[in-house]
Amino acid sequence: MKCRDVVELMTDYLEGALSEADRARFEDHIAGCDGCRAYLEQLRATRQFAGRLASEPVPESLQGELLNAFRDWRTASGKKSL
Amino acid sequence: MSIVWPGVGEQRHASELNALKAGDENAFSALVQRYHGALIRLAMGYVKDHAIAEDVVQETWLTCIRRLDRFEGRSSLKTWIFGIALNIARSRGRRERRMLPFASFFRREPGSSGPTVDPERFGGDGMWKTLPTSWSNMPEERVLGQETMVRVRDAIDVLPPNQREVIVLRDIAGLEASEVCGLLSISPENQRVRLHRARATVRKMLEDYLS
């Protein structure tokens, strides 16, 4: 397998979408290739970096308005406040 | 490199939905907080203005509240919320595009085929000519710094829409591949191709920035 082709299979590999034979060939290649191992690690890190964007603070005004709307709905539907 | 990955990997039970339906405002606030980053990124792909993206997020939650009593939990709560957000963001984006110059309608989606790594990186034998380097040896304050996150965010915001949706839903919102296929009505193969191209573009930006 060529590095040029291996890099294009990396997401399929991470997603568990390679056939058993392809996965074995992929892992054989990775085991002996520093460059592809580093690239795979970078892709995993990229996924984690993106994941960190989840924690963006909610502006107070928005949080307040949404909470009010939620309380209004609760009152209107006759639920007890918790 | 140990990075927390907050949007992903949480298996929450039906108890969260039950708490919401029972009117538990702490459960509601926790959801608003948890998905804010992902919802804003999803919206930003369509509206390109942070204030309008916040409107989209607000409208999403108001719609969720209105429909909560009727939601039976056949999909996961998360998928339900992001499905609503996607519809609102798309329709808001359509409205805004009407006011843009004509050419922007037909802008070709860049990077939708071809290799995701610069062919110059490989020799004639297809093997690496210039090896990628490990980021785990870099100073942590640089790798994990705020500037890095701003660049990742900006790189995601300018991806072609069909790639951006997938990376936001998978890697930021933490949806499963099958959930994303359902929401976007795409095949598993197509989902993987879009995810691959999106991650490869963000990776490239990171490599350029970190080296």
Image: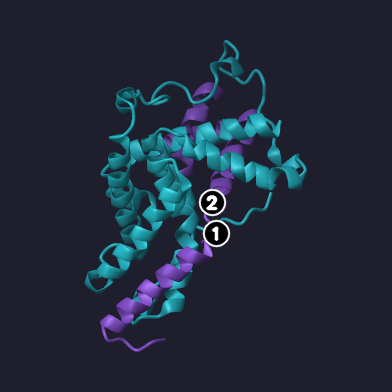
Chain colours: A purple, B cyan
Q: Outermost residue, front direction? A: B99
B111 to A41, vertically: above or below: above
Residue type at the position of mark 2: Gly
- Across and down, in percent, residue B99 comes to 31, 34
Name which quarter of the figure residue B112 lies in.
Answer: top left
Q: Is residue A64 left or right of residue B190?
A: right
Residue for badge 2: A51
- Across and down, in percent, residue B35 comes to 46, 59
User: B86 or B204: nearer the eye?
Assistant: B86
Seen at 54% across and 51% down, the residue is: A51
Q: Subunit of mark 1?
A: B
The label shown at residue B145 is none
- Across and down, in percent, residue A54 comes to 52, 55
Seen at 60% across and 13% down, the residue is: B123
Check the picture and name the quadrant holding the C terminus of chain A.
Answer: bottom left
Seen at 31% across and 69% down, the residue is: B65
Q: Do the CB atoms of the residues marked 2 and 1 lie less than 8 Å apart?
A: yes
Residue type at the position of mark 1: Pro
